Image (cartoon, helix red, strand yellow):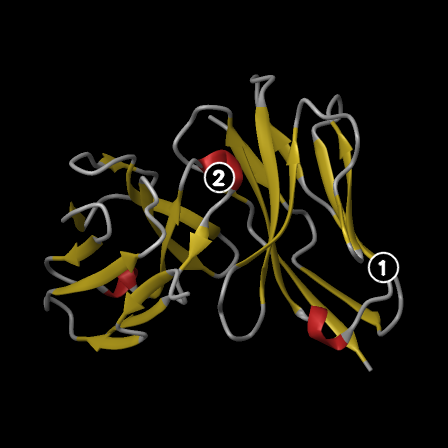
């Protein structure tokens, strides 16, 4: 069975700093997808970024980027120039190509301090 | 642009009561899901429906039933609520999971 591990339950940084959230996963599959979701205090789950395992290039969305290390089964999220609105729970998720479901990590609670 | 609509947003039940959580999506997605979110455990899959007319168990199906009423609607029923079912419940949908999910806003359920 696939598992996703987020080893940092909580993180806190100052506004404008750069922060990296860690995620590791375990799978024997070679074709899969990885995601980061943001859950602000409003509780709404928002897709932040998506990475296809067959792509070597790391995905980027504005201030959000990933460091995808396939051999190490690592998928970290970097937030540059952090803003107060980045305060949220962040979930890493994994899905196998052709499968019907995603597996989520435990989440990292990120607080951006003014 | 409604996306995925869940009702209710909050609910308090007494042990043994039953209730149905409703979910509807207007994006013509094939797949729909029910997850529960508990502190320190992330989101765990309860049931999913890959297409209209099909449902499958997820990681934590015990104590729940689902109905895929049509392509738009996917309901979750608790027949006899227990305190262990206190959680936040999310419905989600996807055209195919590789593109990620669209989530509803969640239901906070408390069973006393």
State which chain disc 2 sits on: A
Callout 1 crowding tier (Cα within 10 Å): few <14, some 14–19, many ≥20: some
Residue at image point 25% right, 43% down: B61
- Quadrant for residue A18, please give it: bottom right
- Dot 2 corresponds to which residue? A103
At x 46% / y 26%, what residue is drawn?
Answer: A1
**Circle 1 — which element?**
loop
Q: Residue at left 78%, top 36%? A: A58
Looking at marks 1 and 2 on the same chain, the residue that comes earlier in the sequence is marked by 1
Q: Nearer the viewer, mark 1 or mark 2?
A: 1
Q: Residue furthest bottom?
A: A114
- Expressed as whole percent of the image width and height from the top left, the position of residue B110 reads 29, 73
Mark 2 crowd level (few <14, some 14–19, many ≥20, 10 Å Cα)? many
Under tag 2, what secondary structure? Answer: strand
Relative to residue A31, is residue A61 drawn left or right?
Answer: right
Give the image location of residue A97, x and y in percent. 50, 24
Which residue is at a point 15% across and 36% down the rendered structure image? B53
Mark sitting on residue B85: none
User: Residue A2 location in percent, x, y?
Assistant: 51, 29
Q: Is residue A52 left or right of residue A61?
A: left
Nearest the eye: A77 or A28? A77
Q: Which residue is mark 1?
A: A80
């Amino acid at each position: 069975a696939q598992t996703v591990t987020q080893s940092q339950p909580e993180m806190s940084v100052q506004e404008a700093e750069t922060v990296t959230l860690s995620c590791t996963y375990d799978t024997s599959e070679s074709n899969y997808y990885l995601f980061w979701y943001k859950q602000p205090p409003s509780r709404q789950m928002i897709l932040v970024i998506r990475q296809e395992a067959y792509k070597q290039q790391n995905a980027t969305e504005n201030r959000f980027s990933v460091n995808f290390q396939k051999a190490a089964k690592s998928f970290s999220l970097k937030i540059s120039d952090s803003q107060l609105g980045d305060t949220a729970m962040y979930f890493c998720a994994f899905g196998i190509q052709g499968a019907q479901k995603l597996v989520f990590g435990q989440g990292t609670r990120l607080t951006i301090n003014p | 642009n409604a996306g995925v609509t869940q009702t209710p947003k909050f609910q308090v039940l007494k042990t043994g009561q039953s209730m149905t959580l409703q979910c509807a999506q207007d994006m013509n997605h094939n797949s729909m899901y029910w997850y529960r979110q508990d502190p320190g455990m992330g989101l765990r899959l309860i049931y999913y429906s890959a297409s209209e007319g099909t449902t499958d168990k997820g990681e934590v199906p015990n104590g729940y039933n689902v109905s895929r009423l049509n392509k738009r609607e996917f309901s979750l029923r608790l027949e006899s609520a227990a305190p262990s079912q206190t959680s936040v419940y999310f419905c989600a949908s996807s055209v195919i999971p590789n593109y990620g999910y669209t989530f509803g806003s969640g239901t906070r359920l408390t069973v006393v």
